[in-house]
């Protein structure tokens, strides 16, 4: 087991290591805090339910998933260990690509998106399906973020396929749905709404290219230049903090442009560059597609012998001598001008 975990741990940058250590530490701290007179702080900080949102605990949408009761039982402890394993497997690649600061802001933003979708589903369950118990149902743990990250990574290669734990090979575009369905079966055929919300966010992230609205390395670099961040050049838990200026995407701010690439344009709009009938200034009202440089045109350089060669321009002095008799009312040969001489 150590031969598997140690190389993964050695590959983890500072933020991933902090989350691997801080995730169980937060669970232990919250468990101890809940048994004190200030146990109400736990609900104040980490409750992401409709009840909390109606009390305007907006911060819980961002940080609520950093806590999970992993010490509440044997199955919860095993799932927490599996969560840490998945963090070590998926987070290092994105952290090295984005930088540690941008990756942390990315996780906070993804938490917020997932919790907003989850709250909307709970709103439907309470007020339309008439299931009042969902009013206090919240999202806990980092599994929704892992599922969303997994979905985004797989949809980056939608035509590929991935092995489902060596049992069956599933196309990447259907793998997240199959994985969440498998977890729902393991939970006793109960819908895991937080994971379902994470899959919805993952698909929407790729289809609507939400990456251009997420924190970029360029913005993270501005944060690292202030305060005591040392411009992102420091170590934590024996691993370097990946500075934004050292990432491949530094200098490319997706918020500064509408589409990052032509593929982004096609993925987002799904429209073709054609004019609609009656929508232009032409009066025909035709409705055919617009074609640049339409028409028969003129053939250039066809080598025809009938083509008239261009006339050579006369020198300026000769033109002046030819114009003098015309100006005096005489024909070019010096006789009085007559009708038909072109004077």
Image (cartoon, rainbow, N blue to C red):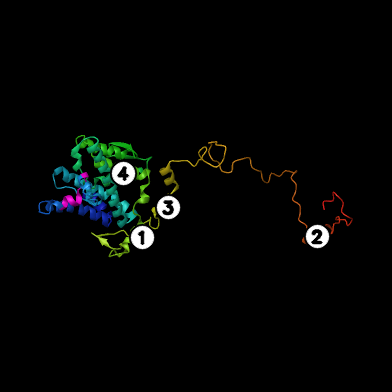
Q: Is residue 246 above or below residue 183?
A: below
**Quadrant in the rendering for residue 333:** bottom right
CA distance for labels 2 and 1: 71 Å
| Residue 245: mark in rendering | 1
Closer to the camera in the image, 243 or 202? 202
Residue 104 in sight in this render = yes
Q: Secondary structure at mark 4?
A: helix
Closer to the camera in the image, 306 or 298? 298
CA distance for labels 1 and 3: 20 Å
Mark 2 or mark 1: whose residue is earlier in sequence: 1
Q: Residues within 10 Å of mark 2 (few under 14, many from 20)?
A: few
Mark 4 or mark 1: whose residue is earlier in sequence: 4
Mark 4 or mark 2: whose residue is earlier in sequence: 4
**Quadrant in the rendering for residue 180:** top left
Are dots 4 and 3 in contact, CB under 8 Å? no
Q: Secondary structure at mark 3?
A: loop
| Residue 215: mark in rendering | none
Where's residue 160, x and y in %?
Answer: 37, 40
Are dots 2 and 3 in contact, CB under 8 Å? no
Residue bearing the label numbered 4 = 201
Q: Is residue 48 magenta?
A: yes
Majority secondary structure in the magenta region: helix
CA distance for labels 4 and 3: 22 Å
Magenta residues span: 41-50
Residue bearing the label numbered 3 = 257
CA distance for labels 4 and 2: 81 Å
CA distance for labels 4 and 1: 28 Å
Mark 2 or mark 3: whose residue is earlier in sequence: 3
Residue bearing the label numbered 2 = 318
Image-based side of 304 in relation to 151, left or right: right
Q: Is residue 269 above or below residue 243?
A: above
Where's residue 217, x and y in %?
Answer: 35, 56
């Amino acid at each position: 087991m150590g031969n598997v975990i140690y190389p993964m741990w050695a590959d983890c940058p500072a933020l991933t290591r902090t989350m691997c250590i801080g995730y169980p530490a937060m669970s232990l701290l919250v468990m101890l805090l809940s048994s004190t007179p200030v146990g109400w702080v736990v609900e104040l900080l980490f409750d992401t339910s409709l009840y909390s949102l109606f009390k305007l605990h907006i911060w819980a949408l961002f940080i609520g998933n950093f806590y999970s009761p992993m010490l509440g039982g044997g199955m919860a402890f095993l799932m927490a260990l599996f969560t840490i394993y998945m963090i070590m497997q998926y987070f290092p690649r994105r952290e090295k690509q984005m930088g540690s600061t941008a990756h942390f802001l990315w996780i906070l933003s993804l938490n917020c998106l997932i919790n907003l979708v989850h709250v909307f589903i709970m709103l439907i369950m309470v007020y339309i399906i008439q299931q009042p118990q969902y009013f206090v149902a919240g999202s806990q743990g980092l599994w929704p973020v892992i599922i969303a990250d997994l979905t985004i990574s797989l949809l980056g290669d939608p035509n590929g396929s991935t092995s489902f734990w060596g049992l069956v090979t599933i196309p990447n575009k259907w793998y997240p749905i199959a994985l969440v369905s498998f977890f729902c079966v393991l939970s006793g055929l109960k819908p895991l709404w937080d994971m379902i919300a994470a899959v919805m966010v993952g698909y929407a992230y790729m289809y609507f290219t939400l990456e251009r609205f997420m924190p970029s390395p360029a913005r993270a670099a501005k944060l690292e230049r202030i305060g005591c961040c040392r411009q992102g050049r420091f170590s934590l838990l024996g691993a370097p903090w990946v500075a934004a200026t050292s990432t491949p995407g530094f200098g490319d701010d997706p918020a500064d442009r509408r589409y990052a690439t032509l593929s982004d344009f096609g993925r987002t709009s799904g429209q073709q560059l054609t004019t609609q009938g009656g929508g232009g200034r032409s009066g025909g009202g035709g409705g055919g597609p617009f074609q640049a440089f339409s028409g028969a045109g003129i053939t250039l350089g066809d080598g025809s012998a009938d083509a008239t060669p261009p006339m050579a321009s006369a020198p300026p002095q000769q033109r002046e001598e030819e114009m003098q008799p015309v100006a005096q009312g005489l024909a070019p040969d010096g006789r009085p001008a007559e009708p038909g001489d072109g004077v």
